[in-house]
Amino acid sequence: MKNTSAVILFAAMLASLVSCKTGGKALLPNVSGKAGEVAVVIDKENWEGSLGTEVKGLLARDCEYLPQREPLYSLVNVSPSAFADLFKYHRNIVMFNIAPDVEKQEIVYRTDVWAKTQCLIQINASCADSASVLLERNGENIAEAIEQAERNRVIINTLQYEETKLGDEIAKMIGGRIHIPVGYNFKKVTDNFIWIADEKQYSTQGIFVYRCPAEDEDPFTLEKIVARRNEVLKNNVPGMFENTYMTTSEYVVPGVRFLKYKGRDFVETRGLWEVKNDFMGGPFVSHSFYSKDGKEIIVLEAWVYAAKFDKRQFMRQTESFLYSFEWDKE
């Protein structure tokens, strides 16, 4: 009876899904829930068992390259019976459909189901063990789908409240633009370096854009990326006191990944920054790639200073601007 009820409930959810889709996206409400929050729809037994432990290990693991421990996402467990009424419009949903008569073990990714910009990840499995196998094989894809949905929401909001003069100046220097919202302002502009920041009383979210000649055969090793970064920041980003300047922290070795997004290849570098001879610091992430003609290395960087606050959401928001980059049309 328990499994039969779960199947009936899930069928009702799918019927609601179809009716929403046919109604058109224009009629969808906005998503609910806090940024960085994921509703996990799963029964109590599996949530408190080994399957729930795996879900938490995947989605609530430590967020990398932050100065203190923070979970990658904040998880909210929702029972299937409570889902339709309370969490149907949540921004990020991971929904488990576990029943003996499930024939195809699969993960289905959907967007804009019950709300605009919603990310729904549906895990269909005949038993908890099969669901665990799906998680093990597809875990990083699940996490990245949620991450991209979070970025996309920031970008959509940014485009509504964009400070176009910032993107214009960036485009003038590198031939492509980042979309940045109102509230950010220029701190420094030169022929090859731009510093933009949103400075509040207890926090700063910053963007660096710079370019360097592509003189090396392999300019994207960790050592060369960090050396280039340190040289540029020493010359352009002074601290509050004499002989202080921003640099890359040596306390944690930065991580490098080679990525592709919307047809653009780039190298992601993630780590911690600090102010030499001072006590300021925080997280940063940069995207390094060739200019269109291949003669220069272009670097887009997001960083955060927020000593009094958790930094996960500050960093996620600022990093999203890097993903809004697009080459100007020729």
Image (cartoon, grey):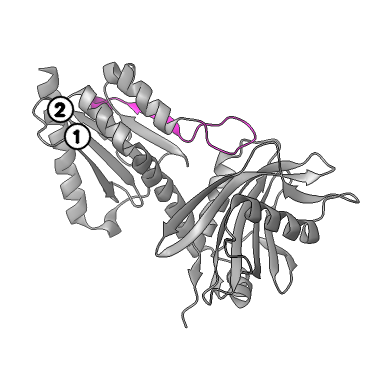
The part of the image, by quadrant, that contains residue 67 is top right
- Residue at point 42% right, 27% down? 57
Give the labeled residue for mark 2. 126
Q: Is disc 1 placed on a helix, strand or loop?
A: strand
Relative depth, front residue between 32 and 113: 113
Q: Is residue 254 left or right of residue 260?
A: right
Give the labeled residue for mark 1. 124
- State the image coordinates of residue 98 (x, y, percent, origin top left): 19, 27
Q: Is disc 2 placed on a helix, strand or loop?
A: loop
Q: Which residues are magenta?
A: 62-82
Is 327 colored magenta in this rendering?
Answer: no
- Residue at point 33% right, 42% down? 89
Q: Amino acid at mark 1?
A: Asn
> Total marks drawn?
2
Is 67 colored magenta in this rendering?
Answer: yes
- State the image coordinates of residue 317 (x, y, percent, origin top left): 54, 49
Q: Amino acid at mark 2?
A: Ser
- Residue at point 24% right, 29% down? 131
- Residue at point 61% right, 35% down? 310
Rendered view: 288 above or below 133: below
Q: Crowding at label 2, few (<14), some or many (≥20) Cα neighbours within 10 Å?
A: some
